[in-house]
Image (spheres, rainbow, N blue to C red):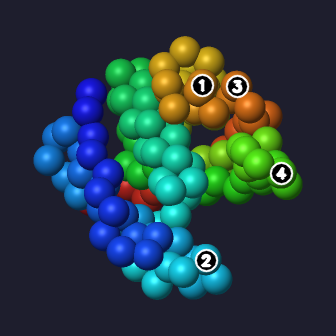
């Protein structure tokens, strides 16, 4: 896997993925940024959220659960001193579907956290990561 990060100006950088996608990352105005994109540490959290969400949806589908949506709300704390690593991350999953079994959703989240999600497992080396979830029942369409 490869990527490239190129300095644009001030504290603004363009990240390019090996798969051909690009994103602007920028700092806050108080450090010279213009707030043109997410902060690099925000990108880490979004990456972990994306990684675990892919796992959860795939596991639920393979378990023949009728999942129609998945959102993960992430709340994190960082260390006060440098390096300001994440010390606590909480992931709250909102899973939508029809007839979803809570034990299957819990199992999918646990499998992602403990076995499949490389990003979360890496972040778990410095942060205490916790999870919870809620299920939103979708109405049957006629």
Q: What residue is disc 1 on? A: 121
Q: Identify the mark nearer the N-term, 1 or 2.
A: 2
C-alpha distance separating marks 1 and 4: 23 Å
Figure disc tally:
4
- CB atoms of marks 1 and 3 within 8 Å: yes
Q: Residues within 10 Å of mark 3 (few under 14, many from 20)?
A: few
Indicate whether 26 appears above or below 65: below
Tag shown at residue 141: none
User: Element at badge 2?
Assistant: helix
Query: Residue 117, image x and y in percent?
Result: 50, 26
User: How much space separates mark 4 and mark 2, taking CA atoms?
Assistant: 17 Å
Across and down, in percent, residue 60 comes to: 44, 29
Q: Secondary structure at mark 4?
A: loop
Q: Which dot marks residue 81? A: 4
Whether residue 137 is visible here, answered yes or no, is no
Q: Where on the picture, by quarter, is residue 112?
A: top right
Q: CA distance from mark 1 to mark 3?
A: 7 Å
Q: Which mark is residue 31?
A: 2
Q: Is residue 45 visible?
A: yes
User: For this rendering, which residue is in front, 84 or 116?
Assistant: 84
From the viewer's perspective, is residue 42 above or below residue 105? below
State which mark lies toward you, 1 or 2.
Answer: 2
Q: Is residue 3 left or right of residue 31?
A: left
Calculate the distance from the C-alpha at mark 1 to the C-alpha at mark 2: 30 Å
Mark 3 vs 4, N-terminal side: 4
**Residue furthest out toward the right:** 80
């Amino acid at each position: 896997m490869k990527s490239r990060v190129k300095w644009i100006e001030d504290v603004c950088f363009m990240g390019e993925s090996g798969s051909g996608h690009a994103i602007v990352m920028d700092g806050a105005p108080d450090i010279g940024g213009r707030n043109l994109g997410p902060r690099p540490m925000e990108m880490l959290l979004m990456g972990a959220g994306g990684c675990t969400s892919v796992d959860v949806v795939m596991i639920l589908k393979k378990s023949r659960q009728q999942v129609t949506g998945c959102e993960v709300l992430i709340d994190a704390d960082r260390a006060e001193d440098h390096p300001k690593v994440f010390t606590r991350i909480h992931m709250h999953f909102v899973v939508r579907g029809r007839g979803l079994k809570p034990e299957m959703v819990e199992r999918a989240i646990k499998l992602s956290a403990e076995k499949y999600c490389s990003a979360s497992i890496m972040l778990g080396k410095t942060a205490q990561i916790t999870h919870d979830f809620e299920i939103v029942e979708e109405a049957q369409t006629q």
